Image: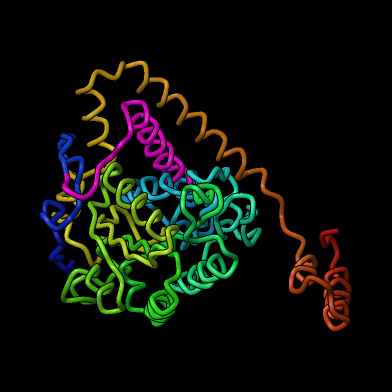
Amino acid sequence: MPVPSTAHPTDDPAIVQLLTPDGVRVEHPDYAFAGDDESIRALYRDLVLVRRIDAEATALQRHGELGLWAPCLGQEAAQVGSARALGTSDFAFPTYREHGVAWCRGIDPAKLLGLFRGVELGGWDPAQTGMALYSIVIGAQTLHATGYAMGLTLDGQVGHSADEGGDERDGAVIAYFGDGATSQGDVNEAFIWAASFSAPVVFFCQNNHWAISVPLERQTRVPLVQRASGFGFEGVRVDGNDVLAVKAVTEAALQRARAGQGPMLIEAVTYRMGAHTTSDDPGRYRDPAEVEMWRGRDPLARVESLLRAGGTPEAFFTDLAEEAEHLGEHLRAACHALPEPDLAELFSLVHADQTPELATQRAEYVSYRESFEGSPA
């Protein structure tokens, strides 16, 4: 039987919100969105195109072109808002669902497909994009992020004033994870290290209320943001379906980290509208009424309402829909064009310099492969 969830409502006054589900701007005493109408349209474009990436990849999986896909439907605002707060010197550590973050970091979404098709381990250069490759191990990336952040401090890239060129010199790290990951030891260990060494890392928890089939209330009896105070740093809850609030809160947290004020936890209260992955059937454990409730808080709909009320011309929406169609065509073509991997290359990717043992193993594999007729070159 589906399990009803005691989902924390996003109209809770303790949650930062700048745009209501009806598309009405509201004020908050501590956070403000400083962008103009054009910047809101740009964020809406991101939201629409990220949703199209997600829908297209899901369809590709259903057609047998991908082995698996982890949908981000409903979580677009949390990802886009936080990623658009990142500066060029900042670095992101994702899970396996941050397709919106990848988009905002300038990664061609076609590069996401190879991993889920099973033909490569990751398709982008972290050094060029400021984003690590996807992490499949739940919570492991928070330790990587904390270590990287500690390195920024040791390299003198934290805590400079504006007169010292802090805007260009300083950087921070953001680590993405879900509510389920907060039950993992790695995440708690990362909190300890980050607090102990005042590491410039923002822990960004996308609380989508379900750790596969486990509801939030079975994982915690209090809001996840309260974990931060137990480790000695600050935390804030934000409406994760409000792209304006997410951007404002993340900007403040990142700037705080760059200034040398240590880590911060952001709990972005959102909802996983679809399945955990395409191998999952949420109908087996989730109440449809809960899904419908959150559908009314759709992150795209509220921004569209705001834009239309503000007089954004219809041509903007028409052109955006056409752009989304072209993006879908690009993804389908790119997926079909992905080459089959040469497994012999794996032996050259273990160490920077190939060891004699690996060279022997590679030769044995190639010999074995060539013993079959019609084997790949």
Residue closest to the eye, 90 or 142 = 90
Q: Quadrant of residue 366?
A: bottom right
In the image, is 373 to the left or to the right of 159? right
Q: Quadrant of the N terminus?
A: bottom left
Q: Is residue 32 in the magenta section?
A: yes
Report whether residue 279 is seen.
no
Q: Quadrant of residue 197?
A: bottom left
Residue at image point 41% right, 79% down? 196
Magenta span of residues:
28-57
Q: Is residue 129 in the magenta section?
A: no
Relative vertical location of residue 173 with respect to residue 164 in this rendering, above or below = below
The secondary structure making up most of the magenta span is helix
Relative vertical location of residue 230 with respect to residue 23 in this rendering, above or below = below
x, y percent for residue 87: 49, 47
- Identity of the residue furthest to the front in this view: 163
Residue closest to the eye, 297 or 186 = 186
x, y percent for residue 82: 38, 50
x, y percent for residue 14: 14, 58
Report whether residue 298 is seen.
yes
Relative vertical location of residue 236 with respect to residue 100 in this rendering, above or below = below
